[in-house]
Structures are given as structure tokens and as C-alpha cells.
Amino acid sequence: QQQVKQSPQSLIVQKGGIPIINCAYENTAFDYFPWYQQFPGKGPALLIAIRPDVSEKKEGRFTISFNKSAKQFSLHIMDSQPGDSATYFCAASISSGSARQLTFGSGTQLTVLP
Amino acid sequence: EPEVTQTPSHQVTQMGQEVILRCVPISNHLYFYWYRQILGQKVEFLVSFYNNEISEKSEIFDDQFSVERPDGSNFTLKIRSTKLEDSAMYFCASSGYRASLTDTQYFGPGTRLTVL
């Protein structure tokens, strides 16, 4: 119920390609869906996020598509660059006590070849 | 740009020993979190902390774990008697002035805990 399922586990694309990472959730109480980017030796950093009442959000080369009825959302990276090579985590946020709690997907290791 | 810092970056300990992982959240943030990531697995929520008390904790956060904000800047995670399965990367995070929908959680670089 609290899980967020993410695929694929790893992804290799050529520079300029459009990698797509998919996530699915079950709990309809999740009300905010951030994506985090993690480079080796660093903590996750917020990349882009979407509310479930919006079907698409674009920030620069990063786009989230959200399908509320299917309980799925995906990250698209346009014109991918070698510097985008990192691990990407989708997450779902829920109000929990007086704070908020993030439930992460299992991560996708993206490699963009030059 | 303000950032969350964590020390040490790597901690090696013997099974049964106590460890304290330290975090300095972003100044003026009010909400504090610990997450962990076992090697090759996903990041998992451990505990949230607000107004000097635990707001929420997961089933992972059993009696062996405790958190504390001993002064105005540090936020600590203590594991009283470490087990082999506690080996993981531990991330501290903080968020700002209200636990609103869009409030970003900023993560530190993590402490890698190795229990031998």
C-alpha cells in the first residue's frame, strides 16, 4: 500500500536521447510526487515535482507526466547529456503526523553515453 | 547555498556497539528527518522530528534507535546496539518552515555505517 514501484532499474542512452523512467503507486493518500537525482557520494537532491491535479510539468529539459487514474507517473529527460548520468528516484509524499514522509521508488541508474 | 551536513562520512563499528550519527540541518529549518538506504536498495523513511519531538516513525525505527536535537544546530541519530543489518547509508534531511505539500526536503550527503 505504501510502496512506489519504479522501472527500469538501469537505463543507458546515447547523448541527445530521451530516457523515460516510470513509477506507479497504490496509496491514493499520496498528494505530492517529487523526483530526486543522486550523484555518487551525494545525497538525493530534488529535481522536479508534481501535484496529482496536474497532468504534466516541465522544468527545463525535465518533464513529469502524471496519470492520476492509472496511478502512474514518469520522468522524461529531453536532449540528455552525459552530465545527467546519475541515479533517479521517484517519490511520493504524504502528510505524516505534523511532518511529511517521503516514500521512495527503488531508483534508476541512468548512463548517458557521449 | 545552505546545505545539510553530516558527520562522519563513514563509520565502522563492531556489532553491539553504540553509534551516533550527526547532522547539521539547514539553519532555520524546523522539520528534520532520517532516512536510510541499504546498499542497492531504495531510500527508506526512518523518523521525522518537529518541535523537539518525534512526529512519525517507521517500523524500522525500533527501540534501538533514538533521535535528539541536543542544541540549536545538531540533530543526531543514535543506534544503541548495532546489528549487522544496520549497515546502510543514513541520510539526514531537513525542510523549512511548514510541512506543506510542496515543502522540499533537503538531504545531506549521508553517513555510511558499516557494522562488522
Image: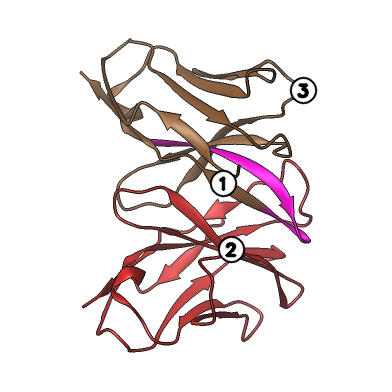
Chain colours: A brown, B red
Q: Badge 2, how many Cα within 10 Å: few under 14, some, many 20+?
A: few
The residue to which callout 3 is attached is: A53
Element type at marker 2?
loop
The residue to which callout 1 is attached is: A103
Residue B112 bears which disc, if any? none
- Do callouts 2 and 3 mark residues in contact (Cβ within 8 Å)? no
- Do callouts 1 and 3 mark residues in contact (Cβ within 8 Å)? no
How many discs mark residues in the rendered view?
3
User: Are the residues under marks 2 and 3 on the same chain?
Assistant: no
Tell whether position A99 is magenta.
yes
Per the rendered image, the range of residues in magenta is: A88-100
Left-right relation of A57 to B38: right
The quarter in which the N terminus of chain A is drawn is top right
Q: What residue do we see at 31% from left, 53% from top?
A: A41
How far apart are labels 1 and 3 at the CA level?
19 Å
Left-right relation of B104 to B112: right
User: Are the residues under marks 1 and 3 on the same chain?
Assistant: yes
Q: Amino acid at mark 2?
A: Ser
Element type at marker 3?
loop
Q: Amino acid at mark 1?
A: Thr
Instruction: Where is residue A73? Give x, y as percent.
Output: 57, 22
Left-right relation of A97 to A49: right
Q: What residue do we see at 44% from left, 13% from top?
A: A78
Residue B58 bears which disc, if any? 2
Q: In the picture, residue B28 is in which quadrant?
A: bottom right
